[in-house]
Image (tube, rainbow, N blue to C red):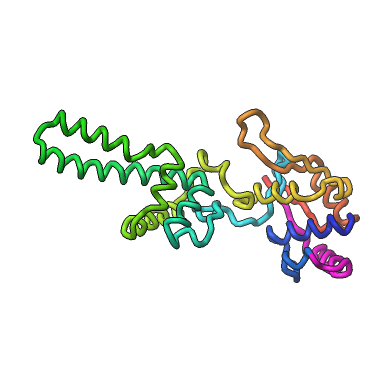
Amino acid sequence: MNTLSRRQFLKLASGIGLGIAIAPRKLEAASTATLNQVWQQANQTPLLFDVTEYGTLSVADYPEPKIRSDVYAIDADWNESPATLALAAESCIPLSWFAADLHREAIEQKLESISESVHELLGCPDATQKIMSNIRKTCGDSDCPEVVEEWLGNLNHAEFDSVVHDIDRWLAAEPNWTHECEYFEAWADGQRAALNFFRGIDLDSISGINIDIVEGEHPGSTYYAAELAMDPEEANAIAAHEGIPLRFRRIL
């Protein structure tokens, strides 16, 4: 394995659990001698992957996500202002869905309050309904992301605090594993972390350890994974012989 691929390998591996004595950001400028030292250290505690009976790879002992904040990389300052909140919703599609629901609820609450006042003023249901229909058209479509993002960006103080509270609860809740999973971050679980790792290295440089990258088994498939296309024991023997800090273990 050449120096460049070692550098990339160590940068990616350190981000998913390979303990090394140098910060990932310092690896970029590390000398060849330093890289060799870190490489030797990494081989003492190789990065371990679990292998299913179908060959699907996952980073071993990777913390499994439980709530939405585990699977979405939303900027830490998302709740500092309406503007940062709007940017957060733009960057995370499931959050934008939830924000659309909040917008829809807010519109309905306002319309209900206005409707009562208009009806008291006019005393005519037909006239009230016509006026409310015109008002509804000015509120914007909750299914339009631009409308929702503009609404978020213009929340007053009380509205902003309420929306932040709702989103905090949303982030602390379990995601909808079926409908949201394709939007999880690359590191969200062990299988995604393994896929992200092997996508990032030169697979031709790992000396005969056969890894396949599966980008969906068929059109519309949500199965994306790195797969070990050989016997785990054989792969381990190659990794040990070549001094590559990778190991594989079978799981049921």
Q: Quadrant of the C terminus?
A: top right
Q: What stretch is highlighted in magenta?
A: 29-49
113 relative position to 104: left or right: left
230 relative position to 93: left or right: right
Image height of 17 relative to 225, above or below: below
Image height of 25 relative to 248, above or below: below
In the image, what residue occupies the spot 72% across and 68% down?
23
Is residue 42 shown in magenta?
yes
Q: In which quarter of the image is the N terminus?
A: bottom right
**Residue 123 falls in which quadrant of the image?**
top left
Assign the magenta stretch its main secondary structure: helix
Of 7 and 56, the residue lying toward us? 7
In the image, what residue occupies the spot 60% across and 51% down?
188
Is residue 103 shown in magenta?
no
In the image, what residue occupies the spot 64% across and 56% down?
62
Residue 88 x %, y %:
50, 53
Residue 64 x %, y %:
58, 53
